[in-house]
Image (cartoon, rainbow, N blue to C red):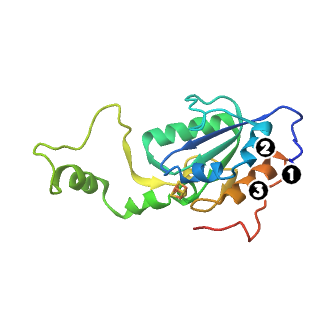
Amino acid sequence: MTLPVMPYGPRKLVVATVSLAGCFGCHMSLLDIDERLFDLVDLIRFDRSPLTDIKQIGACDIGLIEGGLCNAENVTVLREFRAHCKTLVAVGACAINGGLPAQRNHLDLGVVLSEVYRSRSGLSSGSAIPNDPELPLPLNKVHPIHEVVHVDYFLPGCPPSAEAIWRFLTDLMAGRTPHLGHDLLHYD
Ligand code: SF4
């Protein structure tokens, strides 16, 4: 296998990943590059990521964002990623256009919460909408990440295939503008 030529010299690139309002399917697709993960960790070091369980993000070369924005905590985390990552990538349909979570956008959030927690059948008496201060406040609508921060690249798909993620990352690590072509570019 030919590994990409590093554009920044011999140091490893630092990569962070996060799942905002997503299902972790895009992270699963990243792991589906299988044995090429060994090649990848020769070239990069993971910073904050569900893969490392590091909670605080440091200075990074590349940030991979899965999921859109459905609550206030998502917005805070996204802004932290934008502030710390030289290159920010929207990975998958949810990050790019809200994806499945955005299906709730045509509904009134207050009505939805009330129906789920207060009025549907089978609830215990006294059931209420959760309001613990530790819970992040939901946004009225689910937003794609480009509506809040500048995004450098968009990697479509639900999820993007492992092959597409590998091609995208190896292009990026080599300092090339990622180019997937028709064989790997899809939106479903
Ligand atoms: Fe899951 Fe698809 Fe959204 Fe990725 S784009 S987080 S696979 S629903």
Image position, residue 56 (x, y; %): 57, 28
- Residue for badge 2: 39
Residue at the spot 78% in from the left edge and 56% down from the top edge: 178
User: How busy is the neighbourhood of tag 1: few (under 14 within 10 Å), some, or many (20 plus)?
Assistant: few
Task: State if disc 3 and disc 1 touch (CB < 8 Å).
Answer: no
Q: Which mark is residue 64?
A: none
Image position, residue 116 (x, y; %): 24, 53
- Residue for badge 3: 167
Is 1 or 167 nearer to us in this picture? Answer: 1
In the image, the residue with mark 3 has its CB under 8 Å from the nearest atom of ligand 1 = no
Task: State if disc 1 and disc 2 touch (CB < 8 Å).
Answer: yes
At mark 2, the secondary structure is helix
Real-space Cα separation, disc 1 to disc 3, in angstroms:
13 Å
The answer to whether 73 appears left or right of 182 in the picture is left
Image position, residue 135 (x, y; %): 35, 36
Real-space Cα separation, disc 2 to disc 1, in angstroms:
9 Å
At mark 3, the secondary structure is helix
Name, please, the residue furthest toward the left. 125
Name the residue type under label 2.
Asp
Name the residue type under label 3.
Arg
At mark 1, the secondary structure is loop
The answer to whether 167 appears left or right of 141 in the picture is right
